[in-house]
Image: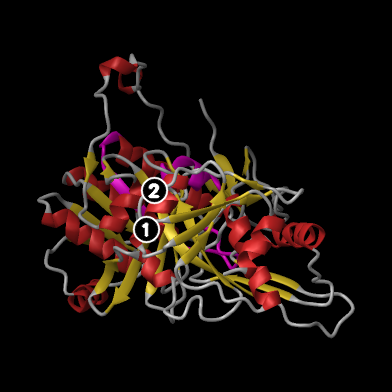
Amino acid sequence: MKKDTFVCNICGYESLKWLGRCPNCKTWDSMKEVKKEKEVHPSQRVRPALIGEEEEGEDRIVLGMEEMDRVLGGGLTRGSSILLGGDPGIGKTTLCFEIASRIMEINLSCLYVSGEESMRQLASRRKRLNLKHLFFVLTTNNLEDVIEATDERDYDLVIIDSIQSIYNPRIPSVPGSLAQLKDVSIRLINHFKKKDIAHILIGHVTKEGQIAGPKLIEHMVDTVLYFEGEKVFPYRILRAIKNRYGPVDEIGIFQMTKEGLVSVKNPSDYFISDKVGENSGSALFPHISGSRPILLEIQTITPRTNFPIPKRVALGYDVNRLYILTAVLEKTSNLSFFERDIYVNVAGGIKVTEPAADLPLVVSLISSLKDLRIGRDVAFFGEVGLTGEIRRVLYSENRLKECERMGIRKVFCPRGVEKPKGLEIVSIDSLRELYERLRSL
């Protein structure tokens, strides 16, 4: 017979006896007794089955929200578990309201569980967003209420807002504690998956921008999404960090309007300013995010420094990579940066990690140092080696198609790239050759 255990309501540490001080988090009087649940009868236990006996393939729900469907990999998979995180006020609830309305629009059912807002507040939000279709709403913080509601009626999607606000009354700890988060997440995910209900768990984030709670939650779910963006700007970026049913690092661009979130069909227009190329220190770069090519602008300024050690600052780009490329450029092209600070910015708030951004960054450095104006109809992509050679990168064809669609006439890239119609391809082998060609623009 299993004995009752004592669980720390701060860190979740378990013990067979009561302890005055938790050995793990060193907190006094935090061990609370937890009753063990009844054992499952052998006839009710899950038995193994051959994989061929189950229904094959993925049953997806196409929401009709282009950017959301793209990030999810083609639509919402039935029975999938999604964890959605983002800063307070960024628009997580607004996004989920849009999803719930779309689910009802295609004759499916959705339950929105709110543990933070009252029914009056939710009704006011729905009216402000001018949503066309009604959906079921449950305002509660009790885990048992959520399970009972989904047992009484079949839903295709359940949205929990937020997972930190739901608690299990059997565990003597406050909502949002590690013990509560572990128990609530495990029970909800297992319950929804047994009933083949797709579910979205909205999660709070910490000061560092990570989803609050143990990493166990992120490991259990199928998809982890982050909703990013500055509140003062109308655009939001939905990024997939983990996705078992689609590509990772896929992004979706939304615009925040009075009527809610609207998918941005042409994000390259957002990331490129009207005055790109008019000033020095700017270079266009066809970036690949997931399966989508987006034209970005890399900006650089190199003012003279008044200090013995110059500054190297990069927003949206790896500063260590900046150090390497600066050293390679100094060695191969006889350019000097030891008396200059370097400030790099990837316009639009996108974080670029792929090596194809090496060449446009080098071009922006040269352009800023020598006061060269590249122009709006020129783009660059390619990896730069330590010896100054320009190396080939993946997805060259997709990059060139995006450049052609955006009106780019000339593209600097490594040799071996197939030349499409309508674009002038400038193949280069080294940084020295690049420098000579830039001076002739």
Tag 2 secondary structure: loop
Magenta-span inclusion, residue 215: yes
Q: Which mark is residue 128?
A: none
Name the residue carrying label 2.
420
Q: Residue at x 30, y 68 (%)?
A: 94
Magenta-span inclusion, residue 8: no
Residue 186 in the figure: left or right of residue 154: right
- Marks 2/1 in contact by CB < 8 Å: the verdict is yes
Q: Residue at x 43, y 46 (%)?
A: 419
Asked whether 77 or 346 is in front, the reply is 346
Q: Residue at x 19, y 47 (%)?
A: 155
Asked whether 414 or 295 is in front, the reply is 414
Q: Say how many tags the image has.
A: 2
- Residue 238 % position (x, y): 40, 60
- Residue 50 % position (x, y): 33, 14
- Residue 433 % position (x, y): 67, 56
Residue type at the position of mark 1: Glu
Among numbered discs 2 and 1, the one appearing first in the sequence: 1
Name the residue carrying label 1.
404
Asked whether 247 or 172 is in front, the reply is 247
Residue 148 in the figure: left or right of residue 31: left
- Residue 289 % position (x, y): 46, 53
Crowding at dot 1, Cα within 10 Å, few <14 / some 14-19 / many 20+, comes out as some
Q: Which residues are magenta?
A: 194-223
Residue type at the position of mark 2: Pro
Crowding at dot 2, Cα within 10 Å, few <14 / some 14-19 / many 20+, comes out as few
Asked which colour scheme the image uses, the reply is: secondary structure
Q: Quadrant of residue 30?
A: bottom right
